[in-house]
Amino acid sequence: MSIVSDARQSLRPSPANDTAPAGDQAPLPHGVRPLLIKAKGGLGNRMLAGVTGVILAQLGGRTPVIDWRDGLYLPEGTNLYPLLFRDPVRIDPACYDGSTCVAPALWSGRLAEQPVSIIARHFPDRHSSPFIYRRLSIPLTEPDPLARVGVFWSYLPKLARLRGRLHADRRFDGRSLDAITQDMLHRYFTPNDRVRQTVSHLFAGRRRPVIGVHIRFTDRKVPLAKIERALAKLRERSPASDIFLATDSAEAQAYITSRFKRVFTIDKQLAEDGAALHYSGTQMSDPLREAENAVIDMFALAECDWLIHSRHSTFSVAASLIGGIPAKRQIDVDRFNPKVVVKRWFQALA
């Protein structure tokens, strides 16, 4: 069944309803031991890393509270997550901002802050370290700490490091990491009404198969020539197919649309100069709408029958998992790039 058509009932954030323990400055929901799931980076990174946080919370008997107040699209301090997705937990992370019984302790009294500022304060020379997330997160491979509030943050998904704990838990044992990830994406990342309706309209009455193409071409560039060759070969096999193109770049969009017919896209702001668009300082007339447009692109890719992309981009990886697009219908243009393959392997296990 289509993920777009399998939407759940809308849920909205609800206020805290209990009194905080001594040392906390804000009321906390009764009986909840939260795991605040912080974020850094683009949409694909934070969704897949968020899945790791959700599962870590479940393994430790905590409630996952997704906290995207880091300035992606909207001003820092505004939680983007419940504006884009239906929140099944409905707890505002701001109610924990003054908490002092926190693990790791460096977050104590600072839960209104985000990973970038914590790293800048405590580890200013380690912003690019693949291991820095371990200092900002409860441990992945050890028992859950006793602190009332826990914090998880990673720039990338870390399910491979949870493999042992997953095998020991009957809720997850025997299931592949991809299957577990797909399940959690469906549970915690059901898009809002506008996104679902837009994707539904995009595909209404469209003939199958549809080829999805994802091209990241701003801060990280997918090789356009490889995309073109893969798309040309697939079009030869299926000449009647339409092509859905999701890209962040006006240059990349012009490149593909000038070479192939029956390419459809959504109307959104595109980068003209190679700069990433998704941070709050970027000039956007309607930042929330552009954030929704990014989600529309991802879920439209998930509706496609084929996917041409680079797995180096977590955006397209998330789309393939959401849509259950099998590996045999994916063309990864970087699959033989040793630099990309080694980097992905190392990041998963770091």
Image (tube, rainbow, N blue to C red):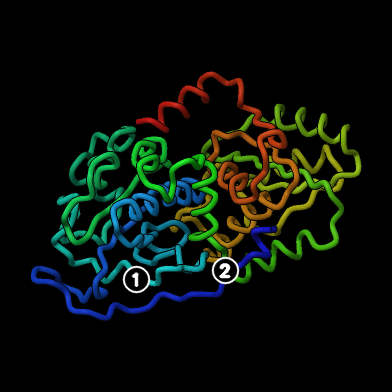
Q: In this rendering, is residue 122 above or below 75? A: above
**How far across and down, in percent of the image, does residue 62 sit?**
30, 59
Image label count: 2
> Dot 1 corresponds to which residue?
92
Horizontal side of residue 206 vs 308, given as left or right: right
The residue furthest left is 22
User: Of callouts 1 and 2, which one flags the residue occurring earlier in the amino acid sequence?
Assistant: 1
Name the residue at 72% across, 47% down.
245
**How far across and down, in percent of the image, does residue 253 sit?**
71, 44
The three-letter amino acid code for the residue at tag 1 is Asp
| Label 1, label 2: how far apart the Cα atoms are | 18 Å
**How far across and down, in percent of the image, does residue 46 sit?**
44, 50
Name the residue at 67% across, 48% down.
246
Nearest to the observer: residue 195 or residue 304: 304
Q: Secondary structure at mark 1?
A: loop
10 Å crowding of disc 1: few (<14), some (14-19), many (20+): some
Nearest to the observer: residue 76 or residue 213: 213
The three-letter amino acid code for the residue at tag 2 is Asn
Quadrant of image for the N terminus: bottom right
Residue 114, numbered label: none
When asked about the image quadrant of residue 290, the answer is: bottom right
Q: In this rendering, is residue 132 above or below 58? A: above
Quadrant of image for the C terminus: top left
Horizontal side of residue 139 vs 253, given as left or right: left
> Dot 2 corresponds to which residue?
192
The residue furthest right is 240
**How far across and down, in percent of the image, does residue 304 sit?**
73, 48
Horizontal side of residue 89 vs 298, given as left or right: left
